[in-house]
Image: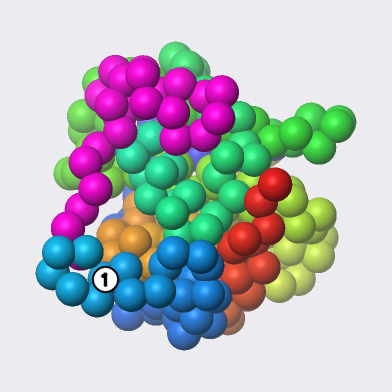
Amino acid sequence: MGGMVRSAAKVCVMLATVGVLSGSVVASAVAEAPGMVGRYSTPDSAAALPPVRGGDKVCDGQVALDWPVSVVAWTEIRDLRDLGLPVCDVTWGFYALDAWWGMSYQDASGEVFIQIEANDAEYADSADPDMAIRSVVRHEFGHAIVYEAGLQEAELRATFTDPLSWTDESTEPGNEVAADAIAAVLAAERNDEQWSVYVEDVSAASIGAAEALVAASVGSGV
Ligand SMILES: [Zn+2]
């Protein structure tokens, strides 16, 4: 199980400037996804889609609710889906979480679940609450990509070696660096910034490894 803590993170959350790390590996992988070629080629097509509204379905069987957090999160999930990422293989849920902004887990059957803090007041201390919510979506989906790839903590840590800015007794460093690195790659792909909680500066090596995981994940959905 991986989580994205909120309260402890407030003192050490870093605003990663990941835009310059946008990699050609990801760009080319995404460009090959159906419907993506030329998406941003004209001012018209570059116009942002409207936000997901309550009652909309981004993923079959998963209804977006009209809470502010749900609207922001589902809009990000939709935009990741439109990049070819298998976000609809995940069951998304919105809860009053205890100490976390997000949680993710894979059950014994292989199903992946992501839980997002539903209360917008919990994000109010962030400089950009909507970006914090989008960052949670991307970080937790980073865990989902790792789960789907079947990677375990030891092999992840051998690849994702960045030091963590903080840990607690349940932190799995390899999983968290991988999730932060994947989130940074996805944020760059979305022309967004990413709140990086566990890693102050995601290394180029981790970004490269994350790009490969993202590229493998694009189009892999059912
Ligand atoms: Zn995490």
> Which residue occupies 81% across, 65% down?
155
Q: What is the three-letter code of the residue carrying label 1?
A: Tyr
Q: Give the quarter of the image for residue 87.
A: top right
Q: Relative to 71, is 94 above or below?
A: above
* Front position in the image: 176 or 38: 38
Which percent across, then down, holds residue 112? 69, 36
Relative side of 194 to 34, left or right: left
Q: Circle 1 sits in a helix, a strand or a loop, which is it? A: loop
* Front position in the image: 169 or 106: 106
Q: Residues within 10 Å of mark 1 (few under 14, many from 20)?
A: few
Q: Magenta region's main secondary structure?
A: loop
Which percent across, then down, holds residue 163? 56, 65
Q: Give the quarter of the image for residue 66.
A: top left
Q: Magenta stretch: residue 48 in it?
A: yes
* Front position in the image: 185 or 198: 185
Ligand 1 closer than 8 Å to label 1 CB? no
The stretch in magenta equals 46-71
Which percent across, then down, holds residue 194? 35, 56
Q: Magenta stretch: residue 3 in it?
A: no
Residue 146 in view in this figure: yes
Residue 166 in view in this figure: no
> Which residue occupies 76% across, 71% down?
158
Task: Please name the residue that numbered disc 1 is placed on.
Answer: 40
Quarter holding the N terminus is: top right
Which percent across, then down, holds residue 75? 33, 40
